[in-house]
Amino acid sequence: MTSDPGSLFCPLEFRYGRTQVRALFSREARLGRALRVEAALAATEAELGMIPAPAAREVEAAVAAGKVRLERVDELERTLKHDVMAMARALAEVSGEGGRWVHYGSTSADITDSALAMELQESARVLREDLATLARALLELARAHRATPEVGRTHGQHGVPISFGYKMAVAAAEVVRHRTRLDELLPRLAVGKMAGAVGTGAGFGPKAAEVEAGVMRRLGLSADEAPTQIVGRDRIAEFTNWLALVASTAERLSTEVRNLQRTEIAEVAEPFDEARQVGSSTMAQKRNPMMSENVTSLARLVRAFALPPLENMVQWHERDLANSANERVVLPHAILLTDDILTKLAEVFSGLRVDPDRMAEEIARSAGGAMTENLMLALTAKGLARADAHELLRRLTRNPGEGPSLAERAKADPEVRRHLDPVEVERLLDPSSYVAAAAEKTDRVVALLERTLAG
């Protein structure tokens, strides 16, 4: 990466993504992982008596001391036209007598795929913590608003009341499920190989299985049980599709904020620095949900990155090179952007401004219509057929913005009065009584999710 800010062209270099996560994918970090694989190979082969122990120590010392310079690797690659061979030769140059044993028995994909597995493992740790942070922000809102009535909406229309806390608990449960999915797929993702040109291990002779097991143990990975020249790409496709799932959840939550922040609803608002932040270059009054819109935009890109890894599963025979170039682009971008959107969402929900008064006004605007289910069920329990009770409520809620409220209509209706007195009607149309069930369920969901996050 160039040090001149004016020459940067990829927005991930200067606009999106956290510095500490971007560092995972720096050229230096990637070279370092590849060299660690080479060192682990030499150490394992020495342990098994395949190469001299002093040679392995020289290789390990050269890697530990950072003697391989990226500039030298680049210089060699310009001539060799092969990145792994350039790295191996650069390591051999600084390993003294041990240099002749560098890369002994292995093939390029042994190094690159094992290094990639390490990179994905490190990335998964970051994303796992991101999900936990977001889930905790949502759970805090769930606890705070466990009994705050809010009208539930289906098809974009008023339905029946829920609590805002329950809405947040539902969101937290979805986020925690993604963390569980990551835990389940990680053993299939943190997988390398040290099995040679077509995956049989023939180049390592009779100790091939021991070599592979030793290298993977040193790197903290598992070995692909049946690789070709490369680790099976279904593993990476599963991971990028998991990223796409996370992105869809992120967009769902950001869209909810954007909708609830609309001027005509105004039940919530994402954080806004009133002292300094600008919403519009023209309309000074604007307080736009910019972070949520940004999350929506980037989530769509993360989902798009799920396609190339699916196509990379299709290889010619034991391997081709058609996956290599796009993986260098897809994986860093998809991971960096997923971290970015999760971090932004956590900021949105940690500072979310919730307006219970506006929520109450919105319920009241339905003139009791949002409580029809309560009334219908009570009429059924008192002896009216459910279908008849439904039809009665459908008739009573015609033209809801005109004339008396539902409570007044119901109390005046002869059929309702045969089954319910006016006090019962008022109680059944009270949103706070209806939302009690949502509060109790929120408590159960929050307790369950907190136990899951603690595990």
Image (spheres, helix red, strand yellow):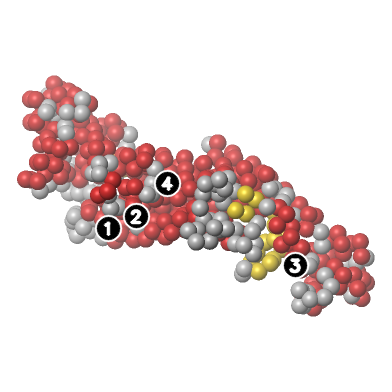
Label 3 – label 4 distance at C-alpha: 40 Å
Q: Which residue is mark 2?
A: 237
Q: Which secondary structure, mark 1?
A: helix
Label 2 – label 4 distance at C-alpha: 18 Å
Q: Mark 4 is on which residue type? A: Asp
Residue at horizontal 76 percent and vertical 63 percent from the top: 364
Q: Which residue is mark 1?
A: 312
Q: Which secondary structure, mark 3?
A: loop
Q: Which residue is mark 3?
A: 366
Q: Is residue 69 above or below residue 441?
A: above
Q: Which residue is mark 4?
A: 339
The answer to which of 336 and 365 lies nearer the viewer is 365
Q: Mark 2 is on which residue type? A: Ala
Q: Which secondary structure, mark 2?
A: helix
Which callout, 2 or 3, points to the residue nearer the camera?
A: 3
The answer to which of 311 and 349 lies nearer the viewer is 349
Q: How many marks?
A: 4
- The answer to which of marks 3 and 4 sits earlier in the sequence is 4
Which callout, 2 or 4, points to the residue nearer the camera?
A: 4
Q: Mark 3 is on which residue type? A: Ser
Question: Circles 2 and 4: CB distance less than 8 Å?
Answer: no
- The answer to which of marks 2 and 1 sits earlier in the sequence is 2
Q: Is residue 237 above or below residue 78?
A: below
Left or right for 273, reference 294 = right
